[in-house]
Structure formats: structure tokens, C-alpha cells
Image (cartoon, rainbow, N blue to C red):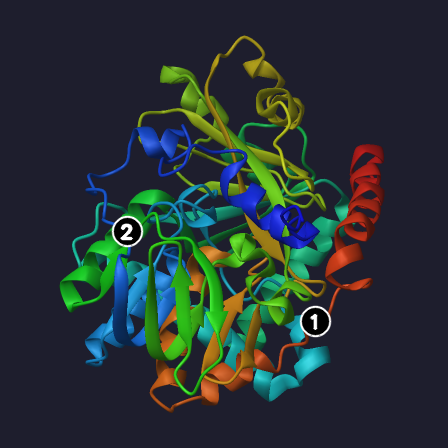
Amino acid sequence: MGARAPSAERVTRMNLLHVNDRAGEYPPSYYAATRADFPRLPPLLGAQRADVCIVGAGYTGLSAALHLAQRGYSVIVLEAQRVGFGASGRNGGQVGSGQRQDQDALERVMGKPDARRLWDLAEEAKGMVKSLIADHAMPATFAPGIAHACYHASEVDHARAYAEKLARDYGYTQVEPLDRAGLRAIVGSDAFAGGDIDRGAGHVHPLNYAIGLARAAQAAGAVIHESSEVTKIEDFAKPVVRTAEGQVTADHVILAANGYLGGLEPEVASRVMPINNFIVATEPLGARAREVLAEPVAVADTKFVVNYWRLSDDGRLLFGGGESYGWTFPDIVQTVRKPMLQVYPQLRDVKIDHAWGGTLAITMTRHPCFIRPRPNVLSASGYSGHGVAMATLAGRVLAEAVAGQAERFDLMARLPTPRFPGGVALRWPLLVLAMTWYSMRDRLGL
């Protein structure tokens, strides 16, 4: 009898990990071209033992490894490719305020006391990024400021009202509302009706931040293995995590693979959907850079499929936009150049030097998914494009839960993250239908 064909979900997982990228290599992005030195780490070989085994060396896994090692736990991190290979090393680098959903929505869903706790957690998350960079002398810099660019007057009104709410109800006074002229003075584009700027938010070089977390985790005693794709987690009193060449027996397992987890844990896969997003880096703009952004801030707009951008240290425009929902990436330059030129038509003559994509993860509600899928296994993922700070905080919260201090994990776990309709098998085609509808609304300006 011939070999049994892999399941559709297993094929999806294999392709998301391998189809768009070379094994064991960072994608050819601007971030990879400017990354700090980080020697390749050996794969897991043979049978090992640890207090905690972590699957995935992105922000969540590396932060958990650091905080657990600082508590005295023995920690092994297994990464299928390289440290920061996934969304942690490819994203827009924006360190935003609050949760992915605004406080109005959280108050309706969770009530005002828990909404306040969630705001405080998010503020702690931003502070963590800043303090970790400083405390561990990471090869990254936190640059302050994120502007939010609104297309419609109603969105500008909402931005102003929300800034007032944050100041009144949460004591957060870092958001400055902007009219059309005020936003135009910062972003250099006539496409917007106004918006705001959050001086308490910021942005970082995402891959160098991930490398900084890895260095800090190693210094604290955590062991990281690259090129160590997890193939199976076996349920025993002490779970066994298997790769092609080794295994780890641990008291606790943390799943931190986000959009690349695939079918490794169906209870998470039913709630967390991988999607692809894309970024380009222009050639250095020289003196033209200040015509694009008058201040070294990051920007995000209000489209459903969000466009986001900032300048690099050497004066390139890093512009992200466009999504896809299949295995392979489209023509990235064509996908991203169109929204970039809608914002900055004056850049039609500018060359694109780098173009890359990556896979992040969303949930139906856009709340992060904190879950205990089985005994002695914890998972955090589905940050829905708001993961730089929140994934860093998730690592600390996971470490607390392993140590028996689960109050903050349980708060995050109360955020509703229902299963996608149709289960794992049908979630993808149903998502494509929904996203196509919202993308059409973006194109029509609705």
C-alpha cells in the first residue's frame, strides 16, 4: 500500500513554513539586510529534558524564555527556521498603544474594570519593549510616535472623541488629534482628512529586536535550537515535544508559533487564522525623505486592510500593504506599490530595493488568543497585527502562568476568541470571501 497522503492542514503548515522561503534562511528583506549579527544555532539532537519547552522563537517564545530563565527554570526553545524568522522579523515594527480593539469595544465586551486592566497591560507592554531594549543593550532603538491617518471626516471625528476618552477615562494624554492640515504637515500626503498622532507609541527594527530578545534569553540561561521543526506533541504526564532529530520531555509546553503553528494544535488552529502581509523598501530617498515624513514617526491608515509605513534609518520608505490568504505570495512589488502610490503619487519614479512577505495570525474578534489547549500546554497567538508589544508581554504572562501566577493569563483568556465558522477545514475559504468583501469596500472608499 502506498504512503498515506498528508492532511490538508498538514500540507498547509508545511507550505507556510517552507514554500515562500529558503530553509534556514531569513527572507531577503530590508530587515535581514540590516540585521545584527546572530550566529546560526544548532538543531535539537537526541533526547533532552527541560522544565519548559517553547515552540517558536519569535517575540512570544523569546520573551517567555527570558522571563522563565530569569525565574530559574530550565528552558529549551525550538525554532523551525531561524530566530525571528516569522512575523516577528518581518512586520512593520509598530509598537502601538492599547489592545487591537479600542477601549470602547473592550468595555462593551469585558466591562469597564477588566477593560481598564487590559489597558494597563497594554501600557506595560509598551514599557517592556523600551526597557528590554535599554536593559539588555539590544541592537534596536525605540523611536517614538505613530500617526493614524483617516480618509473620512467621520473617522477624524471618531479619532478626536477617542483621544478625549483616553485622556478622560484612562489618564492617557499622549494622543493629539490632527485636522487635515495638521496631518498633511507630518505625512506629506493629500489623501487624508485628518487623524491623530500618539506620542506614547513608537516603532522599532523588528528583526533586530527579536535578535536582542534571543541574546537576552540565552544570557539568562535559555537554550535555543534553530532548524528544529516540531512535528508532534505527545500527551503524557510530562509532555514530549518531537522534532525530526530529537525530542524534549518537559513539565510545561508553550506554543508560540503564531501564524506558523498550523495543525500542530487543532484547538488553537480553529481560533487562529494565518494570513499573509507584504512590505516594500524603496531606494534611499535622500532629501525627499522629509517630503514623505516630516518627523521620524510611523503611520497607519484606517483601511480594513491597513496600510502602514515609516522611514528607515537610511531614509528609505518602508511601506506595508496588501494581504493574501493562500500558500504562496503574489507579486509583492505590484501588490504594495499600488497603495503606496495612492498615498504618495510623487514617488512613481522611485525604485523598490526590497520586497518581502510574511505570515501573521488573526482571530475572528481580533483579540489575542490565550488558551490552555491541553494539560500542561499553554498558548498565546493571534495578535492580529498588534503583536510587537503584546507578544512581548504575552511571554511574561505565560511565564507567570507556568509559575502558578495565572491571574493575568486568565484575564487575557477571557477575551472572546470563537472558532472560525466551518472549523479548520473550511475557515480559509470563508475568510477569503469575507476579506474580499472588505477589500472591495476599501477600493470603493466606503
Q: Is residue 362 above or below residue 110?
A: above
Residue annotated with mark 1: 105
Q: Amino acid at mark 2?
A: Pro
Q: Which mark is residue 159?
A: none
CA separation, marks 1 and 2?
44 Å
Please give left or right for residue 1 compared with residue 142 in the image.
right
Residue named by callout 2: 43
The local secondary structure at tag 1 comes to: helix
Q: Residue at x 35, y 44 (%)?
A: 207
Task: Name the side, left or right, on which 227 lies relative to 182.
Answer: left
296, 161: nearer the viewer: 296
The quadrant in which residue 262 appears is bottom right
| Residue occupying the far top of the picture | 349
- Quadrant for residue 361, please give it: bottom right
Q: Front-most of 400 and 167?
A: 400
**Is the residue marked by circle 2 packed among few (<14), some (14-19), or many (20+) residues within 10 Å?**
many
Q: Position of residue 346 (x, y in %)?
A: 58, 15
The secondary structure type at the circle numbered 2 is loop
Give residue 338's position: percent from left, percent from top.
66, 23
Q: Amino acid at mark 1?
A: Ala
| Residue 171 seen anywhere in this rendered image of the structure | no
Q: Residues within 10 Å of mark 1 (few under 14, many from 20)?
A: few
Give x and y (percent) for residue 174: 46, 60
Q: Decide if residue 398 is in sight here.
A: yes
* Residue for point 58% across, 12% down: 348
On screen, residue 81 versus residue 98, left or right, reads: left
Q: Are marks 1 and 2 in contact (CB under 8 Å)?
A: no
What x and y, as percent, mark residue 171?
A: 49, 74
Say which of 175 and 284 sits in front: 284
Residue, far front: 1
Nearer the observer: mark 1 or 2; the answer is 2
